[in-house]
Amino acid sequence: MQTPSPPLFPGPETGLRWRSIGADDVDAWYALIRRMAEVDKPGWVEDRRDLEQALETTSGDPAKDTLIGLDKSGAARAYGRIAVNPGSDTGSGFGGVDPQWRRRGIGSKVYRWQETRLRQRLLTEHRKHGVLRTYAEESNASQVALLQSEGAEVVRYFTEMSRPLTGGLPDAVLPEGMEFRTFDPEISDAVRRAHNEAFKDHWGSEPRNKERWGFTIDHPQFRPDWSFAVVDTGSGEVAAYQLASFDPESKDIHGYNEGYTMLLGVRRDWRGRKLAPAMLREAMRRFREGGMDNAGLGVDTENPSGALGLYESLGYKPTHREVVFDKTVL
């Protein structure tokens, strides 16, 4: 099988000089992310460590799977990258254009480069089917319009939710024979395996290998003191888990400091014992003791497990939504 030619970077008609992203570009790249955030006002903004991790992960080769557009002064004005987990047919696309450089067709050129590069990777791996997946804030009208114009289709909605931590909080009661154990390195891999099992049948979820897991628990926003497992004391097994984070910019973005449940799951053999509501109540308690105003989380709106109803019953209310777009590339 002939290896497809590498995708061409956008041309000089964009007014930018294009190349792959290197470690020396992180400062300029991060400055671009911040300029975009000032205008787009997303519910979450990547920090510098997120960008460093993007260049370190084995899910992409920075020399081939990234691009950055620089103006004559050397300032970053646009970027794009793709990531594909081992064995997956789905590639994740990330990118953006400086607000001052929009409406020049640059975003479309970046998206088409993502398509072409993903197609090349999948063909090289002898894949017969492939999808480019992009997450967009529903409120970001320009990004939504771009994805629609490029033929991507909406396949899912994710709702961000938040709950004030004022007043009395419900008690976190576990069934007999179960106990909370605060996250620590000794149980980290057991929690990782529990997560992979709990999310095995969830839409869009792919197993987290040790590298991806390390990016999660080594991230500066991860809060091990607010994170925990539910351990079955009889068997010593991790039955369920809740991992939490804190974005120091949450006050600026939302108007309140928010403790965030980023991962929550219950293994199949322990479902039906109300472990999820108990964990959320325990998380609320830890968040408030940590000085947080609100507890937050995200939910797949179409998740058939009833998660949305559970969160609503505990006082969580929607704040904004993310739209997931897919485009078939093979």
Image: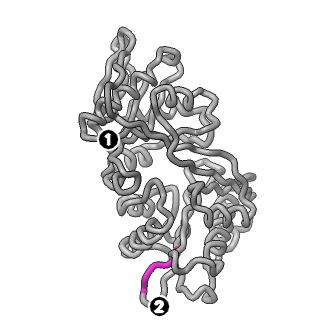
Residue range (magenta): 74-78
CA distance for labels 2 and 1 = 45 Å
Where is residue 82? Give x, y as percent: 56, 62
Where is residue 104? Give x, y as percent: 63, 81
> Which quadrant, please, contains the N terminus?
bottom right
Where is residue 76? Give x, y as percent: 46, 78
Residue 218 in magenta stretch: no
The label nearer to you, 2 versus 1, is: 1
From the viewer's perspective, is 252 left or right of 117? left
The residue wearing badge 1 is: 293
The residue wearing badge 2 is: 72
Q: Secondary structure at mark 1?
A: loop
Looking at the picture, does residue 68 appear above or below residue 127? Answer: below
From the viewer's perspective, is 118 left or right of 44? right
Q: Residue at x 52, y 80 (%)?
A: 100
Q: Which kind of residue does numbered mark 2 sit on? A: Lys
Q: Which kind of residue does numbered mark 1 sit on? A: Asp
The front one of 84 and 154 is 154
Where is residue 307? Give x, y as percent: 55, 29
Secondary structure of the magenta portion, mostly? strand
Residue 76 in magenta stretch: yes
Whether residue 67 appears in this view of the structure is no
